Amino acid sequence: MKKNIAVLPGDGVGPEIIAQAQRVLEAVGKRFGHEFVFEFGLIGACAIDECGEPYPQKTHELCQKSDAVLFGAIGDPKFDNNPNAKVRPEQGLLKMRKSLGLFANLRPIAPFDCLIDKSPLKMERIKGADLMIVRELTGGLYFGEPRGRSENGTVAFDTCVYSKEEIVRVAEKAFELARLRRGAVTMVDKANVLATSRLWRETVKELQAEKYPDVELDFMFVDNAAMQLVTAPGKFDVLLTENLFGDILSDEASVITGSIGLLPSASVGKEVSLYEPIHGSYPQAKGKNIANPIATILSAAMMLEYSFGMKLEAQEIRNACQKSIEEGIVTEDLAGNAAKSYGTTEVGDYICRIIEG
């Protein structure tokens, strides 16, 4: 099978971790007889430096013609530390999501048994936890208009807007995933305060009654959900929520696994889907060969399964990552007090060897 993959390394450690995921995909292709064709595009700070905009039209066209998109990370301190910057790398990510119609972000959260002691949470709290966070990705506070500041600059405002159509399409994705898992959806909102949350609650209730009566549905306020994620994560199966809440809760959930460097994600829409690690560009580690590539490699596994239907190949990647962790072939974020940690490329080398057999 031949597949065309748009590769957007981005900023910071993005090129280093993407390189390992690309190598792993090449190893999978060699073993299983697939051909993956990689074409590279610019996004983020490096795109601003090159052509003045964070998501160039050329990159958009590349993504549109590809079978899937593999994305690294964006962000650069020179923009983070400049509140007056008119163009920012993060604008490229938001524009890409909107332009490609990537309305649902899927983040699986499940700890590796051999890393449970790496989590700051107690073992009895997280053992057996296995949840999927489904976050709406192209609406809400991050995209609502109007937004801006008053003429004298002392007041700033953002607007949170949602339509029933936006809510239905991401909720359908959550219910469908629940049917493949344990059959339960928890919708997280702030319906006691926010009008948009009340629309979410009404819409999801109607959808469940009409199309998914076999899926259990309950509701939870976001402040309670934030507490439950770290005190009883095992109670969740599929957690459905809006853009801002999902952004925060999915990063909070990373402590369950012990490292944000282990968490993959998929951003799906009606056409092309995008796969990326949930961590940022980690500029402090750029060029040091210390960034954990496993989240990006696991994102490539999600791509094989979700976009290409290659479930066996995806599981081989996951098995290889598991073995790498069990054998202690890990970067410094996971090594802890171990006598030795390994570099980004060394972890990639090991995982490729396991896949190649």
Image (cartoon, grey):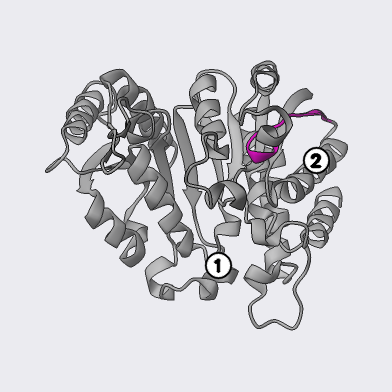
Q: Which residue is mark 1?
A: 113
- Give the camera-side residue of 131 and 275: 275
Q: Which kind of residue does numbered mark 1 sit on?
A: Asp
Q: Does dot 2 land on a helix, a strand or a loop?
A: helix
C-alpha span from label 1 to label 2: 25 Å
Asked whether the beta carbons under mark 1 and mark 2 sit within 8 Å of each other, the answer is no
Q: Can residue 239 be seen in the rendering of this structure?
A: no
Q: Which kind of residue does numbered mark 2 sit on?
A: Val
The verdict on residue 309 being magenta is no
Q: Which mark is residue 28?
A: 2
Q: Residues within 10 Å of mark 2 (few under 14, many from 20)?
A: many
Please give left or right for residue 314 compared with residue 350 in the image: left
Of labels 1 and 2, earlier in sequence is 2
Q: Which residues are magenta?
A: 34-46
Point 43% across, 35% down: residue: 177
Q: Is residue 199 above or below residue 248?
A: above
Point 77% across, 62% down: residue: 288
Please give left or right for residue 94 compared with residue 78 in the image: left
